[in-house]
Image (cartoon, grey):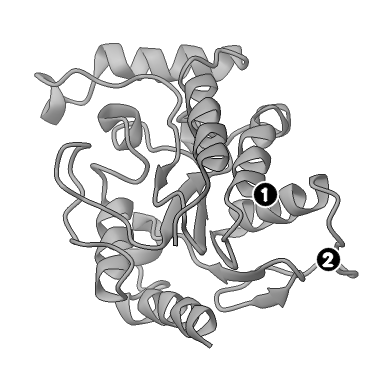
Amino acid sequence: MLASVNDRGALNAIHEVVVDCRACPRLVAWREEVARTKRAAYATETYWGRPLPSFGDPGARLLIVGLAPAAHGGNRTGRMFTGDRSGDWLYASLHRCGFANQALATHPGDGLRLIDAYVAAAVRCAPPDNKPTIVERDTCATYLQGELQALEDVRVIVALGSFAWDAALRAHRALGRPQPRPKPRFGHGAQVDLGSYILIGSYHPSQQNTFTGKLTEVMLDAIFRRARDILEA
């Protein structure tokens, strides 16, 4: 299922605005400082050092929302969830569940292609300590709102972590769509019918969660297999 020409144009327009954004001085300074100083393991690489556009199939029925790019992951490679351990977990799971053509995600030219899935983030610049401020969060919110509006085929949203869960709910509300009351609470496996979409919560595949066993491969796969079941029902 392909998005219309107009929808593709809208997504491309959002991407162009995103990569040139300098709206948040703290985030601009941080992402560029990281790109200059680099991590020793990547000293010979040229960092992206800019906001990240979303990535995936413009006709996707599954939208995956994360928190923000990693300083030495997406901020280095220029693609969402690429070049870090979180991305290794995410794309391996998507591959096992039929939403990606391969598990490998190292750089934008690695051949990775998403199938019926689209990956976005609540905040598009790498934030210090992975903690955007409320102002930074709200400044970036229009990008996810625009993408959600342009991705007309989306039926399931998987939110990776509570920050992404809240961002998805805010984007849904900002588009004038009914908001459930009371506000749905985040949890791994939490699910709520928003009318236009089914929202599913998952723990973020951060090292903090995967190294401690809070999130396992089986748990993450179960989330995306549930999304697949909903889409195929």
Alpha-carbon neighbours of circle 1 within 10 Å: few (<14), some, or many (≥20)?
many
> Callout 2, which amino acid?
Lys
User: In front here: 179 or 126?
Assistant: 179
User: In front here: 225 or 233?
Assistant: 233
Could you tell whether 4 is left or right of 186 in the image?
Answer: left
Is 5 rendered above or below residue 197? above
Residue at left offset 25%, top offset 74%: 96
x and y percentages locating residue 140 in the rendered image: 64, 31
Label 1 sits on residue: 167
* The residue positioned farthest toward the front in the image shown: 5
x and y percentages locating residue 69 in the rendered image: 42, 37
Residue at left offset 44%, top offset 50%: 119
Marker disc for residue 183: 2
Q: CA distance from mark 2 to mark 1?
A: 12 Å
Residue at left offset 34%, top offset 46%: 81
Is 40 rendered above or below residue 79? above
Q: In terms of secondary structure, where does tag 1 sit?
A: helix
